[in-house]
Amino acid sequence: MSGKRFCSVIYTMNCKENLSLSTALLIFAHSDKVQSALKPIAYNKKQNEALWHKMNERAVALVQKTKLPYFISDESSQQGLSFGDKLSHAIQSVLDRGYDKVIVLGNDSPGLRLNHLQKAYLELQDKSVVLGPDFKGGTYLTGISKVSFNKEAFAKIDWQTTKVFDQLQVLYSEVKLGIIAPLTDCNTKIDFDKLFLDLPFYCTFKSVLASLLFYATSILSFLKYCYTNAIIGLNFNKGSPVME
C-alpha cells in the first residue's frame, strides 16, 4: 500500500499525529493474505491476494486524502473472540489516544469516495453517531463519539449479519443520529461482478478488476476455442485425406 503495510499494532499512519483534531479515521480490515484466504474472489491465490492488496491500498489512499489522523487495525492487533469484541477494542484504542470521535471503515466498499468521508465527518461534528448503510442490512461506515460509545453494548451487535444497521439504529435511538448515502459492500464474486458492470467504462479501477477477475477466463476461453477449431475440428473433417 504505497510502500506501507498493515501493522502488528494499531497505530497512526500520518507522519505526525495531530491531536488538535478531535476526529480520527480507523481502517478496520484484514491484511492482504488473511482477507484473500477468507474471501476467495479472483481466479487463483496470487491474483486474489493482489485483489485484496488493491482494496487495502485504495482504503489507505482514500483516508490520506482527508488529511485527518488515521489508524489501521488488522488481525495481528485485534483483540477479542468475536468480530464485535475486536471492533470495539479497536475503536476504544483510538479513543484512548485522546480523540473524541472515530470514523470506522473497512476495505470492501469500492464505491466509497472522499465525499462520503467528508460527509460523515461533517455529520459527526453535530451528531453523536453517523452510519453508512450497505444494501444488505449492514454498514460500510460507522462514526461514533466518545460520549456515546459503550464498548460492551457495541460489541453485542450481531455484526456481519443483515441485522447490523437496524440494531445500531435501536442502540442509538436516544442520541442524534446521522445517516449518509448507502453503498455496496463487496464480499462475494457476484458482488464484484456487479460492481464491474456498474463502474463507468473509463474508470481505472474497472481495468484493475478486469485483469484480476476475468483475465484467466478470457485466456482459457480463447485457448479452448483454438483447440476446438484447430484440432478437434480437423478430426471431424469429412473430406478425403490428402495423399502424399
Image (tube, grey):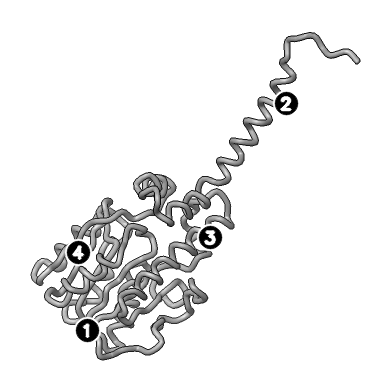
Q: Are marks 3 and 1 in contact (CB under 8 Å)?
A: no
Mark 3 or 1: the one toward you: 3
The three-letter amino acid code for the residue at tag 2 is Ile
Query: How many residues crowd around disc 2 within 10 Å: few (fewer than 14), some, or many (20 or more)?
Result: few
Q: Amino acid at mark 4?
A: Leu
Marks 1, 2: nearer the viewer: 2
Vertically, is 234 above or below 76?
Answer: above
Q: Where does label 4 land, which residue?
A: 168
N-terminal-most mark, 4 or 1: 1
Amino acid marked by disc 3: Ala
Are the two marked residues, 4 and 1, in contact with CB atoms closer than 8 angstroms?
no
Label 4 neighbourhood size at 10 Å, few (<14), some (14-19), many (20+)? Answer: many
Q: x and y percent of residue 39 in the render?
A: 46, 55
Q: Earlier in the sequence, mark 3 or mark 1?
A: 3
Circle 2 residue: 231
What whole-number distance in Å separates the C-alpha atoms at marks 3 and 2?
35 Å
